[in-house]
Amino acid sequence: MATTDEIIKRTAPSHLIDHNLIDREVESLCDGMVQYEKRPAKRRDGSTVDGLYNAWIIFNNPKQFNSYTTDMVKATILAFRRASADRQVNAVVFTGVGEKAFCTGGNTKEYAEYYAGNPQEYRQYMRLFNDMVSAILGCDKPVICRVNGMRIGGGQEIGMACDFSVAHDLANFGQAGPKHGSAAIGGATDFLPVMIGCEQAMVSGTLCEPFSAHKAARLGIIADVVPALKVGGKFVANPTVVTDRFLDEYGRVVHGEFRTGTQFKEGQAMIKEGEIDLSLLDQKVEELCAKLLDTFPECMTKSLEELRKPKLNAWNQNKENSRAWLALNMMNEARTGFRAFNEGTKETGREIDFVKLRQGLAVGTPWTEELVDSLMPQAAR
Ligand SMILES: CC(C)(COP(=O)(O)OP(=O)(O)OC[C@H]1O[C@@H](n2cnc3c(N)ncnc32)[C@H](O)[C@@H]1OP(=O)(O)O)[C@@H](O)C(=O)NCCC(=O)NCCSC(=O)C1=CCCCC1=O
């Protein structure tokens, strides 16, 4: 009987049709700010497999916490299409450069300096943003978000669109929308209720308070969490977070909550002194890729399609209306909030005086250029 290798050699077509839409390098669309790499797939024992790969899609804008510009969004859509169509690709790993941030969402500089007050332009941008989320949810390969750091705002939204998330435990998660002039309707309001339930979704989507990776694991937003901080050559859990007990003296769950006061400060100092090592994160990601490799490929894709439905159905129901609302919102609250973040500093703060704005609106003050300027942090203080 012929071996499988001999049969493959004899029967595979000599010419393969390319199903990509365009024949262009991902990097060329965005000055290398999104990288696309095919890394050899590995078996569970760590050995490399011939002719099979995992596609790594990497945001490369670390100075701005891997926030995505319009060009990066375009490149990301192309990257996911490429990985989806590539017969040699087992799984996609979506991550960012460095250890500080996976992604903190849309680029607030571009929002403030180009899109603010320009709803028709932002509507075009939102076409691309929506296509990026849909490209993740429509990828024929399992998508793993390798959470190499903060996952905030639109970063959390594209992260939650992925099938699995594995994080290092110094990463924070959360939304920024209502604090910065937006609503978290780029996926979060669709995904959060189905992933963590309506109550916790409400807390995250409205209050915009960051939460730890340990809490993200407890809530069920991520599949796994690993330590990244090394002190004296040994891995330790994030020292700014409670990880040594589950309940407080009143029986309330405290595991994964941030420590407070002096304990928090001591934790921060420990992080500063220690060394960050992402090797355990990479190990977990590779392990997951290897498990996915050990399955029938079409059964895997069908399983993904079915298991994505709760997220996908919510997303498809809302994405076009959300796009229109977000575009018009660029005339007032987004224009104000993103400018405030962009123009403010650590000294002045980067948010507006919400009470002042609410007081003005409460007596019918219209949105004017003058009102917006007066709300900027440097003007108010
Ligand atoms: C809370 C933060 C994520 C982190 O705070 P902190 O740790 O204090 O760091 P910073 O000093 O604020 O940031 C370090 C530098 O990175 C720059 N940065 C951070 N995030 C962005 C960004 N999103 N775009 C551009 N630049 C960014 C920051 O300016 C600093 O650089 P500098 O040169 O000034 O020192 C905090 O950074 C934060 O809140 N960031 C903004 C988060 C945000 O508002 N994101 C956009 C949300 S809206 C969105 O993503 C949407 C998606 C689609 C649908 C519509 C929509 O609104």
Image (tube, rainbow, N blue to C red):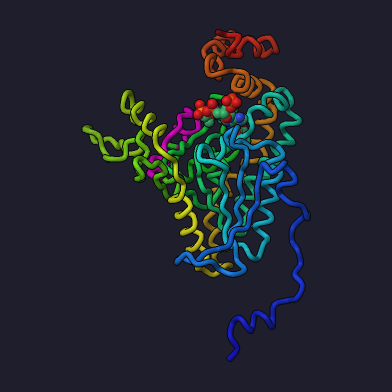
Q: Is residue 217 a member of the stretch shown in magenta?
A: yes
Decide if residue 323 is on the left or right side of residue 296: right
- Please determine whether, in this image, residue 93 is positioned above or below residue 245: below
Q: Looking at the figure, which quarter contains the C terminus?
A: top right
Residue 141 spot, x, y in % from top left: 59, 59
71 drawn magenta:
no
Q: Is residue 131 left or right of residue 212?
A: right
Magenta stretch, overall SS: helix
> Where does the image place residue 136, in percent across and percent down from the top left?
61, 50
267 vs 372: above or below:
below
The x and y percentages for residue 213 are 42, 41
**As rendered, which of 316 and 124 lies closer to the eye?**
124
Which one is nearer the viewer's eye here, 270 or 317? 270
Q: In this orientation, does residue 181 appear?
A: no
Q: What segment carries the magenta color?
A: 201-219
On screen, residue 119 versus residue 255, left or right, reads: right
* Left/right of residue 170 with respect to residue 342 in the rendered view: left
141 vs 264: above or below: below
Q: Residue at x 68, y 48 (%)?
A: 77
Q: Residue at x 53, y 66 (%)?
A: 48
Which image quadrant for residue 110?
top right
